[in-house]
Image (cartoon, rainbow, N blue to C red):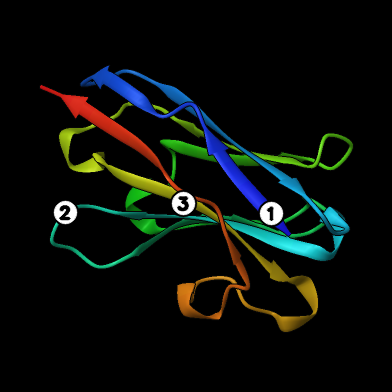
């Protein structure tokens, strides 16, 4: 699976962005999809994930209620809507895919495929 993330950018505190991640190469519906982020000098952090069907979503506690993950299997695309952005949300955001049969959700090291990352910068 090849993944490509889009639509990061510069936004003011309290603003919103919608990230997209387009997949190609294999059957998209066979994979759970996740978003992770990494700020300078910090480790990779789980943000959100969605099951292959889109029926189940998972969020890091600090993102619940502000971020929304969704997917459109007809378009082989997963989205991450970022609302009420804070300066501490500034990071490179990565999308990732893992075979749904693995049961993996939160552990970035177990994901099979990664996109190139898209920068989100929140200015105060």
Measuring 60% from the left and 43% from the top, which residue is drawn there?
4
Left or right position of 53 against 65: right
Residue 99 image offset from top left, x and y in percent: 75, 73
Measuring 69% from the left and 54% from the top, which residue is drawn there?
2
How far is disc 2 from disc 3 in space, using C-alphas? Answer: 14 Å
Query: Quick one: label 1, few (<14), some, or many (20+) residues within 10 Å?
Result: some
User: Can you say whether 119 is above or below 7 in the image?
Assistant: below
Q: Residue 114 appears in which quarter of the rendering?
A: bottom right
Q: Which numbered disc, 2 or 1, marks the residue closer to the eye?
A: 1
Left or right position of 78 against 37: right
**Which tag, 1 or 3, sits closer to the chain's start?**
1
**Circle 2: element type:** loop
Residue 14 image offset from top left, x and y in percent: 26, 20
**Circle 1: element type:** strand
Whether residues under marks 2 and 3 lie with C-beta atoms below 8 angstroms apart, the answer is no
**Circle 3: element type:** strand
Measuring 41% from the left and 58% from the top, which residue is drawn there?
60
**Which tag, 2 or 1, sits closer to the chain's start?**
1
User: Can you say whether 63 is above or below 87 in the image?
Assistant: below
Query: Quick one: label 2, few (<14), some, or many (20+) residues within 10 Å?
Result: few
| The N terminus lies in quadrant | bottom right
Left or right position of 77 against 109: right
Q: Circle 1 is placed at which residue position?
A: 2
Q: Circle 2 is placed at which residue position?
A: 40
**Which tag, 2 or 3, sits closer to the chain's start?**
2
Residue 83 image offset from top left, x and y in percent: 40, 27
Left or right position of 54 against 3: right
Along the viewing direction, whichever of 19 and 113 lies nearer the viewer: 113
Measuring 29% from the left and 29% from the top, which residue is drawn there?
85
Q: Which numbered disc, 1 or 3, marks the residue closer to the eye?
A: 1
Whether residues under marks 1 and 3 lie with C-beta atoms below 8 angstroms apart, the answer is no
Q: Circle 3 is placed at which residue position?
A: 94
């Amino acid at each position: 699976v090849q993944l490509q993330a889009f639509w990061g950018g510069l936004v003011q505190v309290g603003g919103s962005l919608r990230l997209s991640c387009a997949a190609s190469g294999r059957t998209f519906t066979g994979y759970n999809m996740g978003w992770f982020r990494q700020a300078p000098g910090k480790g990779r952090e789980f943000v959100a994930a969605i099951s292959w069907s889109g029926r189940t979503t998972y969020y890091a506690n600090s993102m619940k209620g502000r971020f929304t993950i969704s997917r459109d299997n007809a378009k082989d695309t997963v989205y991450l809507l970022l609302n009420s952005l804070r300066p501490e949300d500034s990071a490179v955001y990565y999308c990732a895919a893992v075979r749904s049969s693995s049961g993996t959700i939160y552990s970035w090291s177990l994901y099979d495929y990664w996109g190139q990352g898209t920068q989100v910068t929140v200015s105060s």
